[in-house]
Image (tube, rainbow, N blue to C red):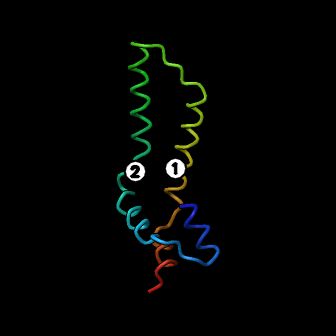
Amino acid sequence: MLSILLALRRGATPVGVSLLLRFLHEVRPWSMTDVFVLAILASLVKLAHIAHVVIGIARWSFGGMMVLLIVAANTFNLRELWEHVNPE
């Protein structure tokens, strides 16, 4: 998405952007990051009884990535991007 936004800011349309926007439109209902986070937490709780799990910095990195994904999913307006790419 960053490459699309930077190219559109320069006034150019990247190759294959319409295919990527169609793909993002189809995949968006399936990107349930909150469910994914709950599944990871449930599996870690279950693994704690079997093995010693050390999460370390991965917990903060994963948490930051999930927050950024949620913010990006809620702020991107695919319709506006599509109108900018294909003004027909």
Q: Residue furthest bottom?
A: 88
Whole-percent x and y of residue 46?
38, 20
Residue at point 44%, 16% (across, down) = 48
Residue 53 coordinates in the image, percent (x, y):
49, 18
- The Cα atoms of the two marked residues, 1 and 2, are separated by 10 Å
Q: Residues within 10 Å of mark 1 (few under 14, many from 20)?
A: some
| Residue that protrudes farthest toward the right in the picture | 10
> Residue shown at 40%/19% (left/top)?
47
Disc 1 on helix, strand or loop? helix
Q: Which mark is residue 29?
A: none
Question: In the figure, is residue 49 to the left or right of 2?
Answer: left
Residue at (53, 61) in percent of width and height: 1
Residue 27's x, y, as percent? 37, 57
Q: Which residue is under mark 1?
A: 69
Residue at label 2? 31
Left or right: residue 61 compared with residue 18: right
Q: Amino acid at mark 1?
A: Leu
Which of 42/14 is in front? 14
Label 2 secondary element: loop
Label whose residue precedes the other's in the sequence (1 or 2):
2
**Residue 26 in which image quadrant:** bottom left
Q: Work out whether 60 lies above or below 23.
A: above
Q: Are dots 1 and 2 in contact, CB under 8 Å? A: yes
Three-letter residue code for mark 2: Ser
* Residue at 52% from the left image edge and 43% from the top image edge: 66
* Residue 85 against residue 53 in the figure, above or below: below
- Report x, y in % for residue 67: 55, 45
Say if 45 sits above or below 4 in the image. above
